[in-house]
Image (spheres, grey):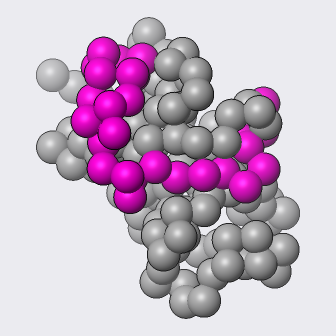
Amino acid sequence: MLVKTKFFNEVEVDGDEIVTFVEGIPGFKDLKRYALIKQEDVLDFSYLQSVEDVGVCFILVPPAILVGNYDIEISDDTVKKLDIEKPEDVELYVILTIPEDIRAMTANLKAPILINRKNNKAVQEILQDDAYSITHRVIKEGDASC
């Protein structure tokens, strides 16, 4: 499938890389279908590109590359919505916010993206646990140098 993208013009995407958000993403409830475009050569970044609106694209990373022990509890409601049978069927991502000053980049650990790869259903789960922040600093003070 040929997908128009915000950053790469048009990209060929396999049908199994199209995910459907059962309730949309908060703030984008009407947009349900997204292409998951993986860029493993760039720090495990992936792009979640709306198939319905070329202007909507999120940059994702697996939370494990940011925090060593990202331990979350998935709600029973989400398990039902995604038809999750086994935990290993779920891919987990967090959304990055990358401002002009890249040193201020943050990750939303409070609301991860969960994708059931068996059926490509997805949700953004807003965690009830206060252990994680919506603005987790990716680059710690003093870490960035050229």
Quarter of the image with the C terminus is top left
Taking the magenta stretch, the answer to whether it contains residue 10 is yes
The percent coordinates of residue 100 (x first, y second) are 44, 10
Q: Nearer the viewer, residue 125 or 132?
A: 125
Residue 121 located left or right of residue 68: right
Taking the magenta stretch, the answer to whether it contains residue 62 is no
Q: Is the residue 131 above or below the residue 33 in the image?
A: below
Looking at the rendering, the stretch of residues picked out in magenta corresponds to 1-27
Q: Nearer the viewer, residue 127 or 103?
A: 127
Quarter of the image with the N terminus is top left
Residue 131, located in which quarter of the rendered image?
A: bottom right
Residue 124 located left or right of residue 98: right
- Residue at 32 percent across and 31 percent down: it is 2
Residue 129, located in which quarter of the rendered image?
A: bottom right
The percent coordinates of residue 17 (x first, y second) are 39, 52
Q: Is the residue 55 above or below the residue 18 in the image?
A: above
Q: Is residue 136 visible?
A: no
The percent coordinates of residue 47 (x first, y second) are 40, 37
- Residue at 24 percent across and 42 percent down: it is 39
Residue 62 located left or right of residue 109: left
